[in-house]
Image: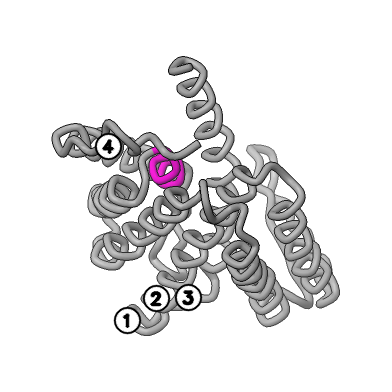
Amino acid sequence: MVPLYSSKTENLAWKISICSVFTAVIAVSTMFLSVNIPATRGYFNIGESAIYLTAILFGRSVGGIASGLGSTIADLTLGYWLYAPATFIIKGLEGYIVGFLTEKERIEHTDLKVKTPLVLIATITFAGLIMLVGVSYYVGLMEFTVTTPIKTSTFQFIMPEIFWIFLSAASGIAIFYISFRFDPTLSWHIIAVLLGGGEMVLGYFLYEQLILGVAAVIEIPINLGQVMIGSVISIPIARSIRTRLKASVN
């Protein structure tokens, strides 16, 4: 089943109204839960869930515009002015990619010549990032602190390289397996989200590293987490909405 833009959204006024509504939804969801990251002057959020939901339901035009505007509004409102220009482009492109691939799902998810390269790109990107960042920056002696009203406790442990190698391999195998063994539409949505999310992770890394000059690598695992959380929330909701609408039409 194609996204909700297939017939009714040919009406420009309807598209504008949907863009307005989901721009607000994305802005609110981004601001709803934000965790400051001092090292990069950025923040963790769950806005990806609304970005992916919007793009899957309404396609590239609504997904791209609402994602760029909504995320930028959140940055400006929360005081992350330095990120606003990049956010407009990076998040807008993220929504556009997911929406564009969703629009193509009727044909491409059954065409292995199209699907296989996309799956390989998504697999290599995410598995590679996990191993590269983990092995380079998160091995050796680690510690974390738990603070309660009674006391503060610090725990130390050794993080071996093999953990990240195993996690990277497991993630790659899982992505590849799900993409070919599960329901074709579900796997296509996962591919779309991973590719859109990969653009977001890479975009912010380059912006932070080249423009802001901050420790950009610190935010890679955090942005990967946003992609994973966003996909877990958005894909089931989008599929449920589309299934119900299809049933009501039939």
Instruction: Please provide the residue range marked out in magenta.
Output: 50-57
Query: N-terminal of the two: label 4 or label 1?
Result: 4
Q: Where is residue 162 in the image (x, y as percent from the top left)?
A: 85, 74
Give percent across and percent down for residue 151. 70, 45
Q: Position of residue 49 (x, y in %)?
A: 48, 43
Amino acid carrying mark 2 in the image: Glu
Q: Please report the residue visible at 53 percent of the width from the left and 31 percent of the height from the top.
A: 237
- In space, the residues marked 2 and 3 are separated at their CA atoms by 5 Å
Q: Which of 98 and 115 is in front in this view?
A: 115
Verify CB contact (< 8 Å) between mark 2 and mark 1. Answer: yes
Q: Residues within 10 Å of mark 4 (few under 14, many from 20)?
A: many
Amino acid residing under circle 4: Ala
Marks 2 and 3: CB-CB under 8 Å? yes
- Residue that label 1 marks: 211
Query: Given this view, does label 3 or label 4 mark the residue nearer the observer?
Result: 4
**Mark 3 or 4, nearer chain start:** 4
Residue position marked by numbered label 3 in the rendering: 216
